[in-house]
Amino acid sequence: MSMIEVKGLVKSFGDLEVLKGIDQNVEEGEVLCIVGPSGSGKSTMLRCINRLEEPTGGEIYIDGELIDDKNIDRIRTKMGMVFQQFNLFPHMSVLENLTCGPVNVKGADKAEAEKKARELLTRVGLAEKADQYPRNLSGGQQQRVAIARALAMDPEVMLFDEPTSALDPEMVGEVLDVMKSLAAEGMTMVVVTHEMGFAKEVADKVIFMDGGYIVEQGTPDAVLNNPQMDRTKDFLSKVLI
Amino acid sequence: MGVYLKGFLIACRGIPTTVWVSIVAIVLGAALGLLLALCSQTKSKVLRVIAKLYVDIVRGTPMLVQALIMAYGVPQLLQSMGSSFKWSNLVIPAIIVCGLNSAAYMSEVIRSGIQAVDKGQMEAARSLGMTRGMAMRLVIIPQAIRIILPAFANEFVTLIKETSVLGYVGVVEILRRGQLWNASSFETFPAYIGVALAYMLLTIPLSKAINGYERRRARKEAAA
């Protein structure tokens, strides 16, 4: 059984059909990178997986369970999501950002949750920032806190929506390093990214999307180094300089 | 000079009533205003229409007219239907009207506050498995409150001043105290100057306190 199963996913915004029938599986422990030009539907696909966008058609299974409006809150606790704009809660300290999910959603013990939050912060290299507020952190630090916040829920899958696109170039590395270590530990990950180097190094599978379709998929080497489709070649020739 | 002092002191005797009515009304207004704001944000069309209608009616009519309807109109209507209803104290309809009135304004303020919170905040909260209600309570509303606090305080200042119409429905608040003294002493100018000063005694420190709070918070946020 696949960890994530996407079947015939269609998503329209009004008259605009953004996803035109996507089928894709993600196995446990697999790192899937989704690349493609803006407007290709890659972020929309990711957002459909945890129903931040409601699919117009098709089915999505997480761990074999079909997602619907009724079970989504429970299923979301299995999926961590990391956003391009971090979306940390500005009125909470870094530590509270990490504990608010476990305590309020899972009913975790506060002291336990704090202990675990500190461990996670150590893991992303930000133990000393626990009592700071997000606005006092750099973009890279905020994104690492956001990853830790998602991990605090003990997810089985992590979804990343262009996690480094809003960062200054010198901060991209620190975030990618955290993601690489996560992948090395066997986390199932779906990453929408423009970081081709990261995809080549970390991904088990890469899919190239354009115009609401998956144009090409395979190993990073196959898709990024030896693309078969003209559309993929064209895209890569523009991003890989 | 003594006559001015007297006018001021007499007006000040109305302060407890004005303050009391204003506080209960602002609390009532904030609670009902939040409810209206949440209604106006729901998917339910019926709730949205009700919230909109409420705001339109309240904002479209003078508070004095609403107070007269509530204090005198409603009991008469109920009596004509065979009830023996009578307000035990006219402060009660006065507070209700102020609260209902304030709710209409507060709902707009709260709604704009909620909408000013970045949409990513709701998404982040939901992605952690929070229900919509939980996300509102833990993430959106605390941020919205910070955004609307100055507007909320301004509404409180406005409300204090608006309670001056309640003298017309028999509530002896600041203005009514001054009017009654004027009627017996004919010291018209000192009476109303005293009333004005009594209102300023409430509104100016309140405005200053809010400004100070805002500045402190801005400083704290910059330093933290």
Image: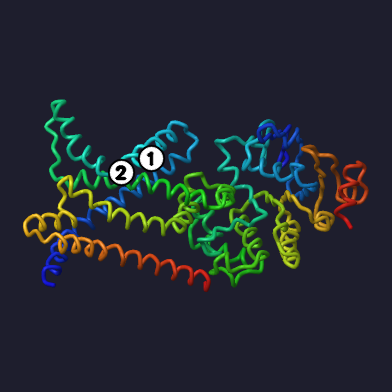
For label 2, count other residues whose C-alpha is less than 10 Å away and answer few (under 14), some (14-19) or many (20+).
many
Task: Label 1, secondary structure: give it.
Answer: helix
x, y (%) of residue A113? Answer: 53, 60
The residue wearing badge 2 is B100
x, y (%) of residue A202? Answer: 80, 56
Q: Residue sitting at 30 percent across and 53 percent down?
A: B159
Quarter of the image with the N terminus of chain A is top right
Using the image, name the chain to which the residue with label 2 belongs: B
Which amino acid is tagged 2? Leu
Task: Label 2, secondary structure: give it.
Answer: helix
Q: What numbered label is drawn on residue B55?
A: 1
Q: Residue sitting at 50 percent across and 55 percent down?
A: A103
**On the rendered structure, is A239 left or right of B64?**
right
**On the rendered structure, is B95 left or right of A112?**
left
| Snapshot quadrant of residue B161 | bottom left
| Closest to the observer, A183 or A149 | A149
Q: Residue furthest top?
A: B81
**On the rendered structure, is B9 left or right of A24?**
left
Q: Earlier in the sequence, mark 1 or mark 2?
A: 1
